[in-house]
Amino acid sequence: MEPERYIMGLFKDEDQVVAAVNELKTSSYTFHRVNSPFPSHKIMAALKLKKSMVGWFTLAGGIIGLVGGFALAVFASVQWNLIVSGKPIVAIIPFVIVGFEATILFAVFGNILGLLTQTRLPSYKLMQHYDPRCSGEYFGVLASCDAGQEDGLNDFFSRQGAEVRVFE
Amino acid sequence: MSQLTYASIDQTILNTLTPPKKYYWAIVLLLFVGVLIGATCWTYQIFVGIGAGGQNIPVAWGTYLINFVFWVGIAHSGTLISAILHLFRAGWRNPIARAAETMTVFAVCIAGLFPFIHLGRVWQVYYMIPLPNQRLLWPNFLSPLMFDVIAISTYLTVSSLFWYTGLLPDLAAVRDRSTGTRYKIFKFLSMGWTGAHEQWRHYSRGYLFFAALATPLVISVHSVVSWDFALANTPGWHTTIFAPYFVAGAIHSGLAMVLTLMIPLRKVFKYQQIITMEVLENVAKTIVFTGLIVGFAYATEFFIAWYSHNTVEIEQFRWRAFGDYRWGFYFMVLCNTLTPMLFLFKKIRTTIAALFIISLVVNFGMWWERFVIIVGGVAHGFSPYAWGLYAPSIIEYGIMFGAFCLFFFFFVLFAKHLPSISMTEMKEMVEKGAVSHGA
């Protein structure tokens, strides 16, 4: 079996990226990813990406925080068990504040956990087949092919108006 | 205006990270000396006791609490700019969002120091942590002071995480243009970010949720701070207007601090192409809006005192305007409500010197607003027998000076070592055509 070659087309224009991605998908080459310096809505739309699952992590964190915040306040008050300022031992209204802040805090923790797990960070392996210009002014489209098809993929990217980088 | 390109954005912002000159380190050193003065004063207070400050009955809450509220307030506009304006898709916030978020993180850190300083026996701070102490006592969550602990620690955590999340793609951009040790540091900090489309898909969603969560949080935090006062049955404090009044005041002072920081930053780093006059003008217009809200709140407090027919409230507000601290009241009205109205004139809000001076005036006025509220309430309470005056001691002045130096010390270090403008968000602006596109 011939070794796989990874080739990146570096574009300066988003519309060219969209055109290249659309053609790559119908070609015999394997499309891997687009690296871009900012989240491009045109590219996202062309890739027909599904909605991220991060929100579910955020929601789960929020629910844990809400229940945990109220539970902590109630538990601590029951341990105290002294009537202060005529308020009941388990006073719902003041505990809304504790519950609310804990909801936000744990929703954010959930959000971070979701972000890290979904984006697979931290991982330095992600920097394999990556061109540093993609955090500057270039959009990198990474594709692979068999070694015998290397010239064809190079030509494909050149025709689309990209600078070509072949990864060894 | 010449056109911004992705390359020119990178170049302008990355140029600010070149090795600093000697005068930069001289400024850092001067600020550090200021920090040491504050630290020395605090150490002295720890050894001598809380009486080293000027607080005494009836005014047990002096500059430590004034500065606490002041710095929490400063923090708020950072979240307004980064989260609330992000949700409203206000593109003009992009050039100043990073610096404003950073200001938030540092301001909350400074604010968080003051309850420790005010505590006196600072080593007993663990009483506020929700863990049973050696007597098996738990914190009392019915107390507004515990609300504060929860709110401020949540705010510090959330704003720090929000700041770092926003910074991540820019850390990768710096990494990609670095070599040697700097490359290693930024490689570690950027966690392997590559801007792959799958990463952006989750990042954009996560950032949106961050903004959506930070928005109610920022409103709740200063409301909770206001309840430290409003839940006490003290004339001048015990009022339902405090939460919105404090939130508006916080954003007012924070926006003024944004101008105070952005104007020198813009000049020193030659950011004129990015932080345009339109951006500064929009901040000035928002200051007019928040200034009107705080002015309305000042007037409402007087109206409610008169309308209530409550003798003690009426006396409290008569004393506020004509009593011992009347100059503090005049400062706050003049600096926070009347002076910002000068921004109604386009010529003034498009003049850099005027913007800078008025921002300093508002910062000054907002400090005095907190003085009038916090000291005024307890100095002139229910019983004339218990009335008393307060003046800060030299130790308090030293600590306050140290706190200001610490804030600017952090900010000056940040400005030269991390990207002070979000390259990612600026490129998004260029892509959307919100600024001139030269690509």
Image (spheres, coloured by chain):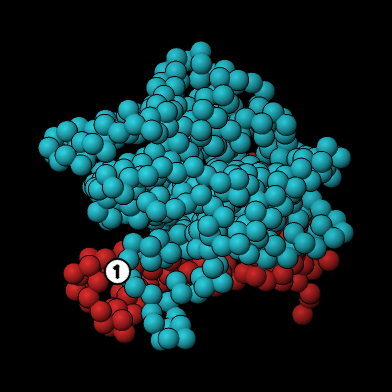
On screen, residue B270 above or below B188? above
Badge 1 density bin: few <14, some 14–19, many ≥20, Cα 10 Å: many
Is residue B34 among what the camera can see?
A: yes
Residue highlighted by disc 1: B142
* Rendered image quadrant of residue B325: top left
Query: Residue placed at 60% from the left, 45% from the top?
Result: B394
Please provide percent x and percent y for residue B266: 66, 31
Residue furthest to the front in view is B385
Residue B279 position, x and y percent, is 53, 29
Question: Is residue B234 shown left or right of residue A160?
Answer: left
Q: Is residue B203 left or right of residue B148?
A: right
Closer-to-camera residue (B217/B388): B388
Chain bearing mark 1: B
Q: Quadrant of residue B401?
A: top right
Rendered position, A55 above or below B248? below
Spot the cyan chain and give its letter: B
Dividing the image into 4 quarters, which one contains the C terminus of chain B? top right
Identify the residue at horizontal 58%, vertical 33% (top origin). Answer: B260
Q: Secondary structure at mark 1?
A: loop
Quarter placement of the N terminus of chain B: top right
Q: Position of residue B122 (x, y in %)?
A: 55, 67
B125 displayed left or right of B8:
left
Q: Which one is in front, B128 or B419?
A: B128
Nearer to the camera, B145 or A99? B145
Image hue for chain A:
red
Q: Amino acid at mark 1?
A: Leu
Establish if B430 lies above or below A136. above
What residue sits 75% from the left and 71% below the top? Answer: A4
Residue B158 in view of the camera: no
Q: Nearer the viewer, residue B333 or B103?
A: B333
Q: Where B308 falls versus B115 (above or below)?
A: above
